Image (tube, grey):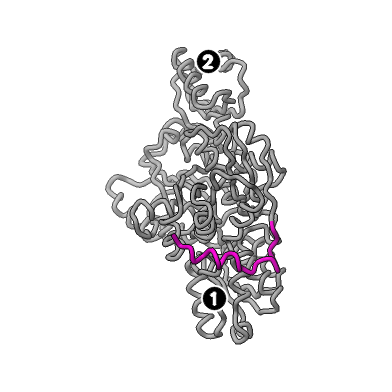
Amino acid sequence: MPREYLRKILKANVYDVACETPLTLAAGLSRRLGTEVLLKREDLQPVFSFKIRGAHNRISRLTAGEREHGVIAASAGNHAQGVALSAARSGIPATIVMPKTTPPIKVSAVRQHGAEVVLHGSSFDDALEHMHAIRQQSGCVFVPPFDDPDVIAGQGTVAMEILRQHARVDAIFVPVGGGGLIAGMAAYVKSLWPDIKVIGVEPQETPTLHAALAADERVVLESVGIFADGVAVRQIGVEPFRIARETVDEVLLVSTDEICAAIKDMYEDTRAIAEPSGALAVAGIKRYAARNDLAGQTLVAVASGANVNFDRLRHIAERADIGEQREGLLGVTIPERKGSFHAFCEAIGDRQITEFNYRYGDDHEAHVFVGVELRDGDADKDGLIGHLRALDYPVVDMTDNELAKLHIRHMVGGPARQVTNERLYRFEFPERPGALLRFLSRMGARWNISLFHYRNHGAAYGRVLVGMQVPDGEIEALRDFLDEIAYPYVAETDNNAYALFLN
């Protein structure tokens, strides 16, 4: 048990800049889950994130000589703002290296705190490498985002406050990225109240700690999800993992839809809008509640941040009802004849239709993409699908189909029957000028683009769906091109949503 952190946390210097945040009852969620759910409101910090705690504790311990050289950090988000504000309050110069893809709102927020911003590269790794080059030349002190004892101790003050604010807690749910927050909190909790569970929550696309605990060693993820960008870390920190493997009881994985539903839950109870990583803990509580009897228990979720781009809210709202199992998405084939729409609506019954996309296919049948209200989650959806199939409607469940939710629902327009040898790929393009041009230039005139759909969700990466006409004999050349372009992708040619609506 890493008890050495207890003293570090008790002596952490955070309150010159950070504030003690409230523990707020989530009344609506508590009623629905049949237990007491409390939110630790770290979104109310001056930089709208817990990151200010660890950053300031580290900066406050600089020597006089180190203070003269200033501090430096690489970050595209909350850590950058924490370092910038702490340095400004401490009278220390700060340099923050950020990828060129960083949204302008985050760059502006860092500059407003007085830090010098250096934009370099297209990814965090590019920015980090450049930051180390600057540090070696300038002598600035590096302030790590999570893998540092002083940073970990600063984050641990979140747990210290929780257990001072509420006399009895059964479990604390903590979002996990690099591991600094959960390491500090778990070290404090388990040193004093070992019976309290500390449960980490990660996106299914970024199981950093989950994978490390399963392997009993730190692992580097091949890819990370971009939706919850605040926890998009490929590898857990060395020191956080050393602590977490001894103190963390469990790590839960949640989907993008579950995160969106949790953001909505938090908004309904507090009227505050969490960033995706800030809602992870609430999503974890809901998943935990689905498998455990929580009657009489008190559960705490760390609402870790609220730095969300406004443009992302449309995507969050779109996915929230699916995550709450209040909406199902179905692909239904109906006869192409007079009265078929009316008959189909009668088959749906009096439930609310949330979305309806249709285009004429041929003289015999049409494909409809329909969203329907669910009253009892998956059981209601399964019952509806069974009812429709009993009436001889072919039905494909699209509710968990990522291609359908990201792209197909926005471009249903009937198949292009004259297109041959079409291969479909879903890409993540970096949100920067020239990304599409680079893709097209590398591809050259080898293959015709037969389909293209792009959606910007206010993130560092855009979601792009591309169809290319590639003969069977050129598949190997296509694979070489995909390896060369090095954009993350998923092959979707065999996806049933594509087959039903576009192919």
Q: Position of residue 256 (x, y in %)?
A: 52, 43
Tag 2: Cα neighbours inside 10 Å, few (<14), some, or many (≥20)?
Answer: few
Mark 2 vs mark 1, CA separation in Å: 69 Å
The amino acid on which the numbered mark 2 sits, given as a three-letter code, is Arg
Q: Residue furthest left?
A: 473
- Identify the residue at horizontal 48%, vertical 19% (top origin): 383
Residue 8 in magenta stretch: yes
The quarter of the picture where residue 271 lies is: top right
Q: Position of residue 45 (x, y in %)?
A: 69, 58
Q: Looking at the image, is 479 positioned above or below residue 377? A: below
Residue position marked by numbered label 2 in the rendering: 337
Q: Secondary structure at mark 1?
A: strand
Q: In the depicted view, which residue is nearer to us: 189 or 366?
A: 189
Residue 89 in magenta stretch: no
Q: Looking at the image, is 296 positioned above or below residue 273? A: above
Q: In the depicted view, which residue is nearer to us: 87 or 137?
A: 87
Q: Looking at the image, is 294 positioned above or below residue 234? A: above
Q: Position of residue 476 (x, y in %)?
A: 29, 52
Left or right for 386, reference 304: left
Residue position marked by numbered label 1 in the rendering: 142
Tag 1: Cα neighbours inside 10 Å, few (<14), some, or many (≥20)?
Answer: some
- Identify the residue at horizontal 62%, vertical 81% (top origin): 70
Residue 99 in view in this figure: no
Q: Which residues are magenta?
A: 1-20
Left or right for 486, reference 189: left
Q: In the depicted view, which residue is nearer to us: 123 or 367?
A: 123
